Image (cartoon, coloured by chain):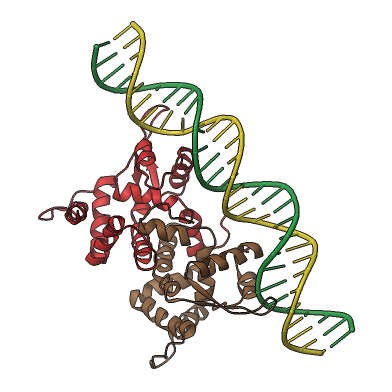
Chain colours: A brown, B red, C green, D yellow
Amino acid sequence: MEPRSGCPINAAVEVLGDRWSLLVLRDVIFGDRRHFRALLTGSIEGIASNILADRLVRLVEAGVLTRGTAARGQRARYSLTEAGIQTLPVMYALGNWGLDWLPGSEELRARQRFMRDEGPAFVEELMDELRVRHLGAPPKHHDGPGPFERLEAALAGRR
Amino acid sequence: MEPRSGCPINAAVEVLGDRWSLLVLRDVIFGDRRHFRALLTGSIEGIASNILADRLVRLVEAGVLTRGTAARGQRARYSLTEAGIQTLPVMYALGNWGLDWLPGSEELRARQRFMRDEGPAFVEELMDELRVRHLGAPPKHHDGPGPFERLEAALAGRR
DNA sequence: GATAGTAGTTGCAAAATACAACCACTTGGA
DNA sequence: TCCAAGTGGTTGTATTTTGCAACTACTATC
């Protein structure tokens, strides 16, 4: 897997630029899916099990996820690394672009719209919360509900 | 090409999430390559001609590029649409991520580093300049050199 | 000790990718 | 006028990646 060039955009494309990697990360981040089955059965796009297994291995190799050690047949728990957490701005930019220029279901567009309305500061807040969940960082005590709760509440309120 | 889901991130991944599309756009945007041969021979990653032809067709179909009408054997000129111009924040986020978390050559990393140092306002300036170049928008008369000139000057100064 | 659930692996067909050669047309110069 | 160089691709073939279904090995629960 030697890189095709030293360009940072190409380097990122080589890791994230395929039809599944970013969707797996999306489900880990926004769906809080940490196990193989949760990612497999929760995938709205319907990822195949061998593709999911392959992507998890690659994302671990690339330093985006870590795999909580588990012997064969045992539940392996996947966590984001700091590099994985910092894919959130990429997803934010990509989602905003999709929102503006491509069709989609209103239900699924609502999350992206909420994020954009809240702005980049909200993305930072989400990243802080991911550091608590995945890296064991000490929680920052804000008043009121956390960013993921606010996001869910907004989505629930739409229905 | 029916979408796999209505999620805006998935929609964007279906258009831009492969190993070549974003690199072609990168060369159009930053290398100002507007013709088939320029994109083919200028590609540092070495894209094959049939892949380039396929990606150009898809990007036009997706509404990211337009193809200046040209009969067979004549020079076709590709231009960015507004949707294409607005992929720049995606590239900015992706490039920053690659800069932080992946190896690369210092020469090619310098452009991304300059962009990041200049910040989001610089990205907006680049997008405005792309609207002049590709959409025929009236130029905004700033004093001094435009954003692409400043970028090139910074890169030349490094050598 | 049977059953359900988890975390994958294996086999095979289909699609995408890579590489090289080739084609049709235009432009510029001797 | 004719030839060479350049442009914008297409075609053929080999390799790689993807997608789907079935299957394995282990654990937890009843």
Residue B114 place in picture, x, y as percent: 24, 61
Q: Quadrant of residue B120?
A: bottom left
- The reply, left or right, for residue B106 in relation to residue A22 is left
Residue B142, quarter of picture:
bottom left
Q: Position of residue A11 (x, y in %)?
A: 41, 59
Question: Does residue A106 appear in this view?
Answer: no
Q: Is residue A36 left or right of residue A59?
A: right
Q: Is residue A31 above or below residue B37?
A: below
| Residue at the front extreme of this rendering | A2
Image location (x, y in percent) of residue A110:
47, 71
Total labels: the figure holds 0
Looking at the image, is A10 positioned above or below residue A34? above
Give whichever of D17, A129 is nearer the camera: D17
* Image position of C10 with respect to A34: above or below: above
Depth check: B69 or C27 in front? C27
The image shows residue A65 at horizontal and vertical percentages of: 50, 73
- The residue nearer to you, when weighing D3 against A27, is D3
Residue located at (34% from left, 64% from top): B99
Look at the image and tell me in which quarter the C terminus of chain A lies: bottom right
**What is the quadrant of residue D21 in the picture?**
bottom right
- Asked if residue B106 can be seen in this view, the reply is yes
